[in-house]
Amino acid sequence: MKLSISILLLLCAVPVLALPDAPTSKPDAFVAVRPSVHRPFWDRTNRIEFGVMISLAAFDMGQTCYGLARGAREINLTQSCPKNVALTAAFDTGAVGLAWLLHRTGHRKLERIPMIWKAQDNLHGIIYSKRHGMW
């Protein structure tokens, strides 16, 4: 055990000046510098997500207003159709705004989450309405 420790200490004691110099790297030869491509916020994927989110919101609000007109009760929103439509439009606008803010701060993958989350929320409302016989 003492022998291996002493060998290790001797190897660590080699002066740095005795080591050969490492060749300098040429950054242009090894690294391909590509200009950063900044894609716009309203690219194809965001337009599709926005269209799906708005379509599901419109269908959900149509069901909600139809159910409210026939005496159904809404559990999460108000009991007024215009107020529900305005509230849903505000939530959809907030989702787009949050996605834009994430895009502007460089969170390119996270910017997809708010509109997808809002679309699944509207889909949940559609399924809830169907289960309770509103259409």
Image (tube, rainbow, N blue to C red):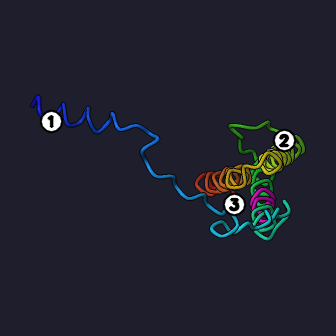
**Dot 3: few (<14), some (14–19), or many (≥20) neighbours within 10 Å?**
few
Residue extending farthest to the left is 1
- Contact between labelled residues 2 and 3, with CB atoms less than 8 Å apart: no
Q: Which mark is residue 4?
A: 1
Q: Which mark is residue 114?
A: none
- Contact between labelled residues 1 and 3, with CB atoms less than 8 Å apart: no
Q: Which secondary structure lies at badge 1? A: helix
Q: Which residue bears the numbered disc 3?
A: 135
Q: Which residue is at 69% across, 60% downward?
A: 135
User: In front: 64, or 86?
Assistant: 86
* Identity, as a three-letter code, of the amino acid under mark 2: Leu
Q: Where residue 126 sits: x, y (%)?
A: 67, 56
Taking 104 as reference, is 13 left or right?
left
Label 3 to label 2: alpha-carbon separation: 22 Å
User: In front: 120, or 40?
Assistant: 40
Taking 118 as reference, is 79 left or right?
right
User: In front: 114, or 61?
Assistant: 114
Give the magenta part as a residue range.
51-58
**Dot 2: few (<14), some (14–19), or many (≥20) neighbours within 10 Å?**
some
Q: Earlier in the sequence, mark 3 or mark 2?
A: 2
